[in-house]
Amino acid sequence: DSGVTQTPKHLITATGQRVTLRCSPRSGDLSVYWYQQSLDQGLQFLIQYYNGEERAKGNILERFSAQQFPDLHSELNLSSLELGDSALYFCASSARQGANEKLFFGSGTQLSVL
Amino acid sequence: AQSVTQLDSHVSVSEGTPVLLRCNYSSSYSPSLFWYVQHPNKGLQLLLKYTSAATLVKGINGFEAEFKKSETSFHLTKPSAHMSDAAEYFCVVSDIWQGGKLIFGQGTELSVKP
């Protein structure tokens, strides 16, 4: 158990809908990362937050947004969903930010868009 | 730009034989490199990391990796494969210019035959 909690584990929805994925980092970790894992793109970095502030942005679509709350949990919002958004979404946390930080990954949220 | 290339998408070994998973990196400066493992239906787990200390890095479950700057390689090895090693393995480089975001290779699926 990594200590990172993601909910829900599975999500099935329809095209055009909006969903929210939730991540609770390990106790004391200030940095939260979101990754998308799909069959064709592999693991792609989406976005990183550190202590409530956005710190790095990757291949995140404009239809997607995220935030980190004062209690340090994070939410990833996906809107106007398309079939291609079906993927496994991982959240990870680390104590701080930086190249040498060890990331702890949650078990992911499997999103299926029908 | 930094990148990693995993040279094999699938490796199959027999139980008790050595494991070699190959990874080459591209970086204009001394990188931070990691190997992560993903077991079926589970999140990602850090196996080991290289951060410019010793070039031979020992990780969990008997895995180790050697950083070879001259070859720009960071291959993962294990002397004797176990059935429980069957999983997907990711070679990862950390981008220090973007808060340490991780850039993942495409992954190598390791199969272990009895």
Image: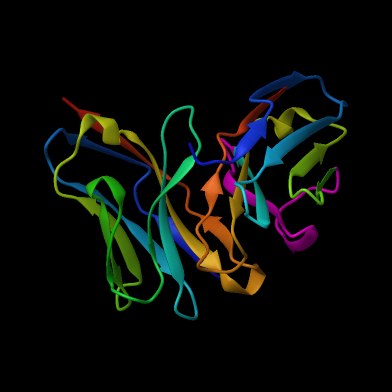
Which of the 4 image quarters holds residue B59? bottom left
Please provide percent x and percent y for residue B40: 43, 28
Q: Is residue B108 above or below residue B30?
A: above
Q: In screen coordinates, is A40 left or right of B57?
A: right
Q: Is residue A44 above or below residue B34?
A: above
Q: Quadrant of the C terminus of chain B?
A: top left
Q: Residue at x 72, y 32 (%)?
A: A84
| Camera sees residue A110 | yes
Label tally: 0
Q: Residue furthest bottom?
A: B29
Q: Residue at x 55, y 44 (%)?
A: A105
Q: Residue at x 18, y 39 (%)?
A: B81
Please provide percent x and percent y for residue A62: 85, 48
Which of the 4 image quarters holds residue A99? bottom right
Q: Is residue A40 magenta?
A: yes
Q: Which residues are magenta?
A: A38-63
Q: Residue at x 72, y 34 (%)?
A: A85
Q: Is residue B47 above or below residue A99?
A: above
Q: Is residue A10 magenta?
A: no
Q: Nearer the viewer, residue B69 or A8?
A: A8
Q: In screen coordinates, is B83 left or right of A36?
A: left
Q: Quadrant of the N terminus of chain B?
A: bottom right
Q: In screen coordinates, is A4 left or right of B91?
A: right
Q: In screen coordinates, is A102 left or right of B98?
A: left
| Camera sees residue A89 | no
Please provide percent x and percent y for residue A40: 58, 39
Q: Nearer the viewer, residue A63 or B50?
A: B50
- Check the image and tell me how it is coloured: rainbow
Please provide percent x and percent y for residue B76: 29, 55
